[in-house]
Image (tube, rainbow, N blue to C red):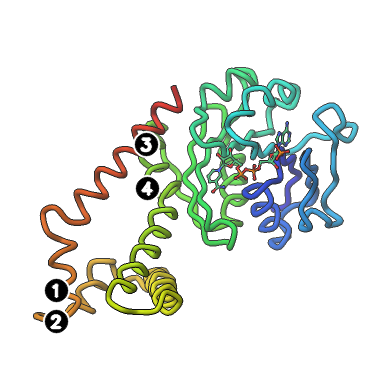
Amino acid sequence: MTASLLLVGCGKMGGAMLQGWLADGMVERVVVIEPAGLPEVARHPAVTVAAGPDALPPGFRPDVVVLAVKPQVMDTVLPAFQGLARPGTVFLSIAAGKSLAGLARRLGTGAAVVRAMPNTPAAVGRGITVAVGNANVSRESAMLCDRLLQAVGEVAWIADEAMMDAVTAVSGSGPAYVFLLTETLARAGEAQGLPADLAMRLARATVAGAGELLYRTQTGAGALREAVTSPGGTTQAALSVLMASDGLEPLLERAIAAAAGRSRELAG
Ligand SMILES: NC(=O)c1ccc[n+]([C@@H]2O[C@H](COP(=O)([O-])OP(=O)(O)OC[C@H]3O[C@@H](n4cnc5c(N)ncnc54)[C@H](OP(=O)(O)O)[C@@H]3O)[C@@H](O)[C@H]2O)c1
């Protein structure tokens, strides 16, 4: 399946996706609108640059318009693309907190719109994106969006858009929690007498290695944890602190609730 695409915004996430599509060979043509200048990846024979929505190649009818600008500018950017809303074209937005109804209001009620929430590991092809489409999205368009999103990692579809706040809190913001875990693990190692550089090296390799183990095996996280916990051993001593009633679980529950609440507030 090859497709023709319009990419609006080629920053960190748009650039990562473009890289994935080109590596995949799945796009026949990509027109990119990006005022900040194009990343190296965009210098490819399949990529054409347009200065703005008024400078698209004549007769260009993309299968997918990927909207990868910041949420704050989305509302002002969208109306200029209303003319592309027609059967056979789907708008795929990756903007955090921008609802299907809000996007369709600015594109026209007949527009087929998919709202997706990727996360930063997309930059290395290991993201996870959650997607939801409005009633105008055909099966074919949904499959095409799925394929485009898979170029930067896994994809899960939901039927209920209300879940997006929790998705944002878990996987959208989630990489930051793991980076914080790495930082605090290193600092705790320093507190036990390790030099800072060794402590960070250990923390980094441990988080990355444990993540890779989770990724490569079908074994659940709980079973992997139990496998490294011998009764009365060192891991169990740490877990008895982390799994106490005031340990990690209630802390993360509060953190995720705060992120989901903020996501609901931002969506207005
Ligand atoms: N990064 C993530 O981890 C992540 C995760 C989930 C979702 N997202 C979503 O992905 C979207 C993009 O985020 P990002 O991190 O990739 O931001 P970014 O690096 O700032 O990329 C956005 C790009 O869009 C450009 N732009 C601004 N106005 C434009 C216009 N009128 N037409 C075309 N391009 C325009 C910006 O150029 P200027 O710099 O000149 O303004 C910038 O290069 C956001 O909506 C965000 O919510 C990102």
Query: Residue 128 versus residue 36: which sits nearer the camera?
Result: 36
Q: CA distance from mark 2 to mark 1?
A: 6 Å
Q: CA distance from mark 1 to mark 3?
A: 36 Å
Q: Secondary structure at mark 4?
A: helix
The image quadrant in which ligand 1 is located: top right
**Three-letter code, disc 4:** Val
Residue beneath the point at 76% across and 57% down:
41
Vertical relation: 112 (above or below) 239 = above
Q: Which circle marks residue 237 in the picture?
A: 1
Residue 98 in view of the camera: yes
Q: CA distance from mark 3 to mark 2?
A: 40 Å
Residue named by callout 3: 163
Residue beneath the point at 48% across and 37% down:
132
Task: Give the class, few, some or many, for how many residues have Cα within 10 Å of label 3's Cα (few <14, many ≥20).
Answer: few
Asked whether, in this view, residue 222 is left or right of residue 112, the answer is left
- Asked whether the residues under the numbered discs 2 and 4 touch, taking CB atoms below 8 Å apart as contact, a structural biologist would say no
Residue beneath the point at 79% across and 57% down:
40
Q: Which mark is first along the chain, 1 or 4?
A: 4
Residue named by callout 2: 233
Q: Which mark is first along the chain, 2 or 3?
A: 3
Q: CA distance from mark 3 to mark 4?
A: 11 Å
Residue named by callout 4: 170
Asked whether, in this view, residue 55 is left or right of residue 197, the answer is right
Asked whether, in this view, residue 158 is left or right of residue 121, the answer is left
**Which one is closest to the eye, mark 2 or mark 4?**
2
Q: Which mark is first along the chain, 4 or 2?
A: 4
